[in-house]
Image (cartoon, grey):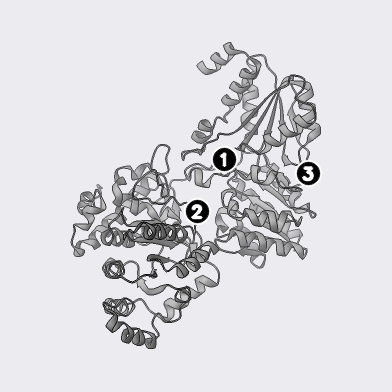
Amino acid sequence: MALKTPLLDRIVTPEILRSLNPGQLRQVADELRAEIIDAASQTGGHFGAGLGVVELTVALHYVFATPDDRIIWDVSHQAYPHKILTGRRDRIRSIRQKGGLYGFTKRSESAYDPFGAAHSSTSISAALGMAVARDMKGGDNNVIAIIGDGAMSAGMAYEAMNNAGALNSRLLVVLNDNAMSIAPAVGALSHYLARIVADNPLMSLDAIKERLEAAFPVDFATAQARAQSYAESGLGNGTMFENLGFTYVGPVDGHDVEHLVTVLDRIRDNDRQGPVLLHIVTEKGHGHPFTAPNAEKYHSVNKFDPETLVQAKSAPKAPSYTAVFAQGLIEEAEHDPSIVAITAAMPSGTGLDAFGKRFPERTYDVGIAEQHAVTFAAGLATEGIRPVVAIYSTFLQRAYDQVVHDVAIQRLPVRFAMDRAGLVGADGATHAGSYDLAYLCCLPDFVVMAPSDEAELKHMLVTSLAIDDRPSALRYPRGEGVGVPLPERGQVLPIGKGRILREGNRIALLSLGSRLHECLRAADELGHYGLRPTVADARFAKPLDTALIRQLAQEHEVLVTIEDGAAGGFAAHVLQYMAGNGLLDNGLKVRTMTLPDFFVGHGTPEQQYAEAGLTWSDVVTTVLGALGQPQLLREVGAN
């Protein structure tokens, strides 16, 4: 059935939205929600967060003169309705696909996206910077930060609020309180917000107007009397936000577009300096069509049939790396009561939801607080506990100082399990695990491992748990394994020792991590040209298997290293060892294959690795180029 959205069809830009009368906004919100649901049925992707802020998005663009007024979305998978209202509706069904709309806000995509965001808790800091810049330039535009989906659990949000309260710049922070991150929100702050809502029910329109008149008096003559009455009423008095220097307004029903417009109108017209925090209460996934319960409010969905609501799912050919890690950790924890698991608001994404069901007393979800997660683990390690910190590679970047200062320098045996290493598909450059090899391999006495398949992951997990005198990390990709048989239980590997899978001559392919099977396929292809490469799996990026590297360098004419990480990682350390030990002095041809020196855009992983030049055919091309056989190179290109 064709989607009928007569009002939304007219809204090409927010200026057209602002020409409507307020009584039409409910219909706009309903049509916008229907459009998001219909688009998601065709594309899949982030879903619940956008549905939860439909009314807020309509109200913001109705009240504020965007893009001159700046709207900064935190955890910007909330921004799908924002994209639809800002001239990108015709491309919304291309979202997260190669060449299509990005799944988060992106400055280069639209003037309505003043700040790019895909990680959390950056909005208040960025908005404060924009507000201060406006004041320096003598401007008068509004700056609004929308923070939600658990992002207030991260310390950076409070650093920004502390600074904003001191600077007293005019700034609006909208706290989208939906009791969720990707999973249900955790921690004392979520309980605090729940108490505020319990003690102060959602405000009626009359109460909103009264509160706003008290908070933003129309003239100074009435300000003192109203402020006194406001304080005596107990409303808005003494919240944590006010103690940080913010004017607090709320809680307000975030799904009542008329109420939201009333509040935002008055805040916009406020002439007083100082930051304001508007506390709205929403439901993540509000209005979703599914009937089955889902604790995560359909944060992300696969494509689905809009009639039956059945989500498309392909039958897995092999268990995912995430599932193998989780099961392996459970198996080891059955034998060792000192093993604990820590995640930063990603229990299901890291597989620790399964571990938590089996060992709830040994599972710690610290919220979106990677810095705390790392140092918390360091504290546990000082007392003989075996902490495993499961954080996506891209999110561990947020805690790098803690990895260095609190773990590495003190040689504490914290184990880092870095999911989503390498390129990750539709989430694009902001979520790619491209840099962990570069930023961990430079740290003294750090053990860094990368499994080439799911069986190796089980072995490396057990190996990391056996390392009790220094930190260790294992990085593994998103998605399914390659389908190898899994051992009943992992075995401890010799530290810093790789393995040779195929013996050959002239050419050596030294792989680290998930590209090994591309190397094996490349070796098969090179066999068609009479070449028989040696294929080796490094297993360890640090410490290096120097004996293996020496053997490959001395017995071959060409050595190619392959890794799914940025330059400066594994290959850089191999080259430094070889250069320092004279292994480059006798004409050895070395080629290093890493991720390119640009941010690879979103697409399928296959499309991304083709763009990055890390497929089996790229390995073949690299080898033939090093051998100086252009005729064969042309034949490969023709094939």
Above or below residue 248? Residue 74 is above
Above or below residue 116? Residue 598 is above
Tally of marks: 3
**SS category of the residue bearing label 2:** loop
**Crowd around label 3: few <14 · some 14–19 · many ≥20 (10 Å):** some
**SS category of the residue bearing label 1:** loop
Estimate the x, y position of residue 64 in percent, counting from the top left: 28, 60
Q: Nearer the viewer, residue 531 or 335?
A: 531
Asked whether, in this view, residue 12 is left or right of residue 573, the answer is left
Residue contact between numbered discs 2 and 1, judged by CB atoms under 8 Å: no
**For residue 591, what is the image quadrant?**
top right
Q: According to the image, label 2 marks what residue? A: 119
Q: According to the image, label 3 marks what residue? A: 493
Residue contact between numbered discs 3 and 2, judged by CB atoms under 8 Å: no
Estimate the x, y position of residue 564 in percent, counting from the top left: 61, 37
Comes first in the chain, label 3 or label 2: 2
Q: What's the CA distance linking mark 2 and mark 1?
A: 31 Å
Q: Amino acid at mark 1?
A: Lys
- The residue sitting at 37% across, 58% down in the picture is 134
Comes first in the chain, label 2 or label 1: 2
- The residue sitting at 20% across, 61% down in the picture is 24
**Crowd around label 1: few <14 · some 14–19 · many ≥20 (10 Å):** few
Estimate the x, y position of residue 318 in percent, counting from the top left: 59, 42
Above or below residue 232? Residue 521 is above
Numbered mark located on residue 317 in the image: 1
